[in-house]
Image (cartoon, grey):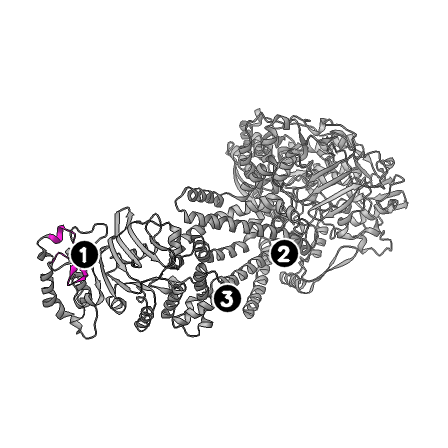
């Protein structure tokens, strides 16, 4: 998801408040947050049933859209559950439990048939829109239909476009059907039943059913790209005011009935969200008590980290959230001599992973990754096929691999990174240094972030022509699941010659085959094992150099109640939060 | 009745890094009401410094002023401006004493209409309405000979010719009917043709005038009395008729000799004074003029050791500061100087 | 005078056309030189997993498949005649001058800009007033007491003001005055002036001072030098000879003349203020044009960029025109030439 990818905002503030932090910091204790270690084992801070008060959120950027069809940020999906009910949802629970799916608008998780190509849901009775109109399966179908129209809703994910058996259907706005329900891939045999027909098997369809795209939209109120100005609520809160790009406020939705909803216990009476707030100011306000939640969930900025970790009282109010995001460097098997597995292994052995971690801010920024799947993803396993003492690299082994590769003296290649990202620059420089120890010489080539994938590193002929053997990159899962994390970066069939690829050179038919197998495996545990196998295969063949499993340092003001990190979103669960401030 | 202006032993010294510049070093003079005194001398002789000291226009802190400057104001009586407070002197400026300057273009504010500048001065000292003050300004402009004064009152200085500007300047300074007008090189920056007009204008003023010029011709046109300055002191002081008829000081001879005159041949025309004016930091001992004086040897060494004081020569009102014995000087004047004048 | 203004306006229209055309060229032609196709450009505005078909759909919707000059023509046409846009189920008319819709958020650009303009104007006006008053008065006092303790201290502070970046002074000020002492409004505070002028001023006080600090420093130095020159002029001596009190001499005669060159610089600064406003608005999270422009550029959001370019150019054009006209008012010598 685009969610955690907000370094653009943090670059500027690094230099600034680093200085400021020095000015303000008097004494400094040892670093390291004291709250829950990670989402996987998190408990609940300040558990409370106390209702009332207003929760104040702030966003350092703008929302992509509040429209459930048009949003693709993790925090937005987390937050959307306050005003919309999708068919299923991530459970509002701490740690690993938060990464499990539970039925929301539906009575149960999806029932698959036809080898995971047909998925059926039955809606709970009694759910209403904020105007009192009952929600029917047609409202859900209409919501999914409109989410297919990417010309109108460009921001949202395209999973339904990819998996539904569309038969050329593009948009309800171009639908000749008078009810605009002409999509044959979704059937609504009655008010409470909805059936999805897929073009190929997809065992993890429930993950798609938890995206906001399945939150019902009443056709009569649909204003297309202007719908975001007033989204019609089915959740416990409805929009009271909405000033685009500035702020919006929410109040309790009187039509929301707790009896129809086992998942939500809404505590605050109101919610305010300020948009486009200076990132450093968000941190300042959070620390001063003028703000309750930094909504992006990407954690305290580097400048404020000193002020947070430096004070014992504040440190106790921090949580380190493990994120389903991996900072890694792809080893492009298109570029000689990296087409030889031994040369790739030489790179992995020669790498100083501690240096990689330093580039991302040390232990606060994340932990050293030894394989692909972030530990926060259910079923993920840690393993290290290229061990070295203190992760500093094993030069002897690297040289050994170089000999097997037929390049005993080493070789030269290029490394690319996104120019606007100082951390990736630091990574490239760290790799240049550590690989030189084995005689692997890197030429560093920065490219503009906006077109990194479309025109440069993600375009196979460009990457090959420019000898980009190493490509610095990062990837986060759309949801904590092997498919959500792996499909776009290891499947060779998603590589398009025209560019725009996020698979930067992993081509292995065996991996492709395992992916297909996972998609028809409906048993979650068996499926998780396949993801681990793919992970292992990627590492065995040395297709990628894992760097850092990202972490975010979250701060919770003392007045915040019922605070926990859910592995589902790897940030505080916004559905559960309350406040003691009245 | 005491004179309008009486200056006694005025000294204006400027301390600098190189030493003390003695711009005025013991100047005394008197000016009666309604009379005109001309001060002549080369540039650097201290005439402007003296005038500015009288006006109190030296920047505090830069100049050290001593001596006495007695001004007998109709309004506020007799006061020593050296010892008076800055505020008291300011109130006399414009009202009792006024000054016009060499370059009327730079002396007038470029951004205000001439009417505004006149009115500003007038209203400062008179509690009248703006309209009345403007009417007064128009009258003044009329009086100093500016045609269509009614419309020109709203013009800016750059819209006037040089002579007209000086008339404006004079009008502005006359606005309050000062007892004393100091005119510092009032015609130097003007065309020859308008010089006479301005001098006529000044001559017709009711105020006492202290006119300062390096040009003896200008002074001759205006002054009742003449004071010749050299190196910060008076070297000759007396009624204009006497000074011109029988100049006594060799320096005055030099000034008169260097005056251009139409009736002289080209070769006769200019007889410049040899040498250059002395440094005001190191004024020569004895008579400050002796290094440039052709007759210095005739003083028996006094010229290089004793500073000459003003004493009568010719008539009792005609004073000269020179070591030459009077008879000897009369002889030189008769034999050498008069034929060339 | 009227003809002069009309002539300047016509020139301004040409300038705006050139500036926006240049923006178009930079936006479309530069990536194209690097080999980007219309679909490549469109992919910036598509979700991460968008398929080539979806991206192509977006490219068509955004008009990228047309030649650049057609797109530019459409932009100009929208400005002059307005344009129609599809929201999906309906079509909305965007009346002239239509700046189009954001590629990314699909919000109409003009209302957003108009919404934000008062914020930037408030910031600019208050900041400019403070920096003029503070800078000029400091400069005058420094000039009159040249070499004094005040002079040396003021010039020292001025040097700091010129050298310290806004985000540093701004964040420091926020930390100290808003969060520590609690005497000024926290970041992100803004109240429209027509709602509550007192609140408006209170919220903007710190941003004003921060912005003014940067400029006041320069103006203090400029004024000081100008005053030192002017106070040596003949007309100052004349003013004193008239018997004017020293205060009048300094303020009405000296400062009046010294202000003229400052006015020129002030006009240029005011026009270019957007630059300072960007940093100040970002630092204080003020919802103004400055922050909007940063977002526009970072997100490659062409309609927003064009809107900001237009507003920014208009700022400069208007400021220059006003200064030229003011110059004639201030300096009569210019008026009659």
CB-based contact (under 8 Å), mark 1 and mark 3:
no
| Mark 3 residue crowding within 10 angstroms, few (<14) / some (14–19) / many (20+) | few
Query: Which label number is shown at residue B310?
Result: 1
Discs 1/2, front: 1
Classify B159 as above or below B73: below
Q: Can see residue B91?
A: yes
| Mark 1 residue crowding within 10 angstroms, few (<14) / some (14–19) / many (20+) | some
- Answer left or right for A242 relative to C186: right
Stretch of the chain drawn in magenta: B302-324
Magenta span contains residue B320: yes
Q: Can see residue A165?
A: no
**Quadrant in which the C terminus of chain A appears:** top right
Report the Cα–Cα distance between label 2 and label 3. 52 Å
Q: Which secondary structure lies at badge 2? A: helix
Along the viewing direction, whichever of A189 and C88 lies nearer the viewer: C88
Along the viewing direction, whichever of C85 and A239 lies nearer the viewer: A239
Magenta span contains residue A433: no
Q: Circle 3 sits on which residue?
A: B131
Along the viewing direction, whichever of C16 and B113 lies nearer the viewer: B113
Q: Reading the chain from its start, which is encountered first: label 1 or label 3?
A: 3
Q: Which secondary structure lies at badge 1? A: loop
Discs 2/3, front: 3
Disc 1 is attached to a residue of which chain?
B
Disc 3 is attached to a residue of which chain?
B
């Amino acid at each position: 998801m685009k969610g955690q990818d907000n370094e653009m905002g943090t670059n500027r503030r690094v230099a600034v408040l680093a200085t400021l932090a020095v000015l303000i910091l008097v004494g400094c204790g040892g670093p390291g947050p004291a709250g829950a270690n990670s989402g996987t084992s998190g408990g609940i801070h300040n558990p409370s049933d106390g209702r009332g008060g207003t929760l104040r959120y702030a966003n350092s950027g703008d929302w992509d859209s509040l429209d459930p069809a048009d949003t693709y940020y993790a925090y937005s999906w987390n937050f959307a559950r306050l005003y919309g009910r999708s068919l299923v949802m991530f459970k509002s629970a701490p740690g690993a439990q938060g990464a499990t799916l539970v039925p929301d608008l539906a009575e149960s998780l999806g029932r698959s048939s036809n080898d995971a190509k047909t998925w059926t849901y039955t809606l709970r009775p009694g759910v209403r829109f904020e105007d009192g109109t009952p929600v029917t399966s047609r409202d859900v179908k209409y919501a999914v239909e409109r989410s297919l129209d990417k010309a109108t809703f460009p921001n949202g994910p395209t999973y339904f476009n990819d998996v539904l058996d569309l038969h050329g259907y593009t948009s309800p706005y171009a639908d000749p059907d008078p009810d605009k329900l002409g999509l044959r891939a979704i059937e609504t045999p009655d008010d409470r039943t909805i059936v999805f027909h897929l073009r190929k098997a997809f065992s993890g369809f429930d993950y798609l059913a938890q995206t906001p795209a399945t939150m019902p939209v009443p056709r009569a109120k649909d204003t297309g790209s202007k719908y975001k100005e007033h989204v019609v609520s089915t959740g416990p809160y409805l929009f009271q005011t909405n000033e685009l790009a500035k702020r919006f406020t929410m109040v309790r939705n009187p039509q929301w009935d707790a009896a129809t909803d086992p998942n939500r216990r809404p505590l605050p009476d109101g919610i305010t969200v300020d948009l486009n707030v200076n990132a450093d100011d968000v941190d300042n306000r959070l620390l001063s008590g003028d703000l309750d939640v930094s909504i992006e969930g990407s954690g305290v900025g580097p400048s404020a980290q000193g002020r947070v970790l430096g004070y014992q009282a504040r440190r106790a109010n921090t949580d380190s959230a493990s994120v389903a995001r991996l900072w890694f460097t792809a080893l492009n098997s298109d570029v000689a001599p990296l087409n030889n597995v031994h040369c790739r292994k030489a790179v992995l052995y020669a790498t100083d992973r501690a240096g990689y971690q330093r580039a991302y801010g040390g232990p606060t920024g994340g932990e050293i990754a030894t394989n692909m799947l972030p530990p926060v993803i259910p079923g993920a396993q840690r393993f290290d096929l290229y061990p070295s003492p203190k992760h500093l690299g094993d030069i002897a082994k690297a040289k050994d691999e170089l000999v097997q590769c037929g390049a005993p003296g080493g070789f030269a290649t290029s490394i690319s990174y996104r120019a606007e990202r100082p951390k990736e620059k630091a990574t490239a420089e760290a790799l240049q240094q550590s690989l030189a120890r084995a005689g692997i010489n890197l030429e560093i080539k920065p490219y503009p972030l906006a077109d990194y994938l479309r025109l440069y590193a993600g375009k196979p002929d460009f990457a090959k022509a420019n000898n980009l053997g190493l490509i610095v990159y990062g990837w986060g899962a759309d949801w904590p699941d092997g498919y959500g994390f792996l499909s776009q970066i290891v499947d060779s069939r998603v590589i398009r010659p025209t560019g725009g690829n996020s698979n930067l050179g992993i081509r292995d038919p065996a991996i492709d085959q395992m992916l297909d197998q996972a998609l028809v495996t409906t048993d979650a545990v068996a499926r998780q094992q396949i993801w681990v196998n793919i992970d292992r295969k990627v590492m065995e063949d040395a297709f990628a150099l894992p760097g850092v499993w990202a972490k975010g340092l979250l701060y919770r003001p003392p007045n915040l109640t019922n605070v926990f990190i859910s592995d589902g979103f790897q940030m505080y669960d916004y559905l559960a939060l309350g406040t003691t401030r009245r | 009745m005491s004179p309008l202006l009486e200056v006694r032993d005025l000294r204006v010294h400027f301390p600098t890094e190189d030493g003390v510049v003695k711009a005025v070093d013991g100047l005394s003079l008197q000016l009666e009401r309604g009379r005109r005194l001309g001060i002549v001398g080369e540039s650097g002789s201290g005439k402007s410094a003296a005038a500015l000291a009288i006006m109190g226009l030296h920047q505090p802190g830069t100049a050290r002023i001593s001596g006495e400057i007695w001004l007998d104001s109709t309004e506020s009586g007799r006061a020593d401006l050296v010892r008076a407070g800055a505020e008291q002197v300011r109130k006399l400026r414009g009202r009792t004493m006024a000054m016009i300057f060499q370059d009327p273009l730079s002396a007038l504010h470029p951004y205000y209409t001439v009417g505004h500048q006149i009115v500003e001065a007038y209203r400062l000292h008179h509690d009248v309405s703006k309209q009345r003050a403007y009417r007064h300004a128009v009258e003044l402009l009329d009086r100093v000979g500016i045609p269509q004064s009614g419309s020109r009152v709203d013009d800016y200085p750059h819209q006037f010719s040089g002579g007209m500007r000086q008339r404006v300047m004079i009008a502005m300074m006359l606005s309050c009917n000062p007892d004393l007008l100091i005119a510092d090189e009032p015609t130097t920056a003007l065309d020859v043709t308008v010089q006479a007009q301005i001098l006529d204008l000044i001559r017709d003023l009711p105020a006492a005038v202290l006119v300062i010029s390096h040009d003896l011709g200008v002074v001759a046109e205006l002054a009742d009395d003449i004071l010749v300055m050299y190196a910060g002191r008076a070297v000759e002081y007396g009624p204009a008729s006497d000074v011109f008829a029988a100049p006594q000081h060799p320096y005055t001879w030099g000034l008169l000799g260097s005056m251009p005159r139409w009736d002289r041949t080209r070769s006769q025309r200019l007889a410049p004074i040899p040498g250059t004016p002395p440094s005001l930091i190191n004024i020569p001992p004895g008579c400050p003029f002796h290094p440039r004086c052709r007759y210095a040897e005739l003083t028996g060494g006094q010229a290089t050791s004793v500073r000459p004081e003003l004493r009568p020569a010719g008539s009792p009102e005609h004073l000269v500061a020179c070591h030459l014995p009077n008879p000897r000087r009369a002889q030189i004047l008769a034999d050498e100087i008069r034929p060339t004048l | 005078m009227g003809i002069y203004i009309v002539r300047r306006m016509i020139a301004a229209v040409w300038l705006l056309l050139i500036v926006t055309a240049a923006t178009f060229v930079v936006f479309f032609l530069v990536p194209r030189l690097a080999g980007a196709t219309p679909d490549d450009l469109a992919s910036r505005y598509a979700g991460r997993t968008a398929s080539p078909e979806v991206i192509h759909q977006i490219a068509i919707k955004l008009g990228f498949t047309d030649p650049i000059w057609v797109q530019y023509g459409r932009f100009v046409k929208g400005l002059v005649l307005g344009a129609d846009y599809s929201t999906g189920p309906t079509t909305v008319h965007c009346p002239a001058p239509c700046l189009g819709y954001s590629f990314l958020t699909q919000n109409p650009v003009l209302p957003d800009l108009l919404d934000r303009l008062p914020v930037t104007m408030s910031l600019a006006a208050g900041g400019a007033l403070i920096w003029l008053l503070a800078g000029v008065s400091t400069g005058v006092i420094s000039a009159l007491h040249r070499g004094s303790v005040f002079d040396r201290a003021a010039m020292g502070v001025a040097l700091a003001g010129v050298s310290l970046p806004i985000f540093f002074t701004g964040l420091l000020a926020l930390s100290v005055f808003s969060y520590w002492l609690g005497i000024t409004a926290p970041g992100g505070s803004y109240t429209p002036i027509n709602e509550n002028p007192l609140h408006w001023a209170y919220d903007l006080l710190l941003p004003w001072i921060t912005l003014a600090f940067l400029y006041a420093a320069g103006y203090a130095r400029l004024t000081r030098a100008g005053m030192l020159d002017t106070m040596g002029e003949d007309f100052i001596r004349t003013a004193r000879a008239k018997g004017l009190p020293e205060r009048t001499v300094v303020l009405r005669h000296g400062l009046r003349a010294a202000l003229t060159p400052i006015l020129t610089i002030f006009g240029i600064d005011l026009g270019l203020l957007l630059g300072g406003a960007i940093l100040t608005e970002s630092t204080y999270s003020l919802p103004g044009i400055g922050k909007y422009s940063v977002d526009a550029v970072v997100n490659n959001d062409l309609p927003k960029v064009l809107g900001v370019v237009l507003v920014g150019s208009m700022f400069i054009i208007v400021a220059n025109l006003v200064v030229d006209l003011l110059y004639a008012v201030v300096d009569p010598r210019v008026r009659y030439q």
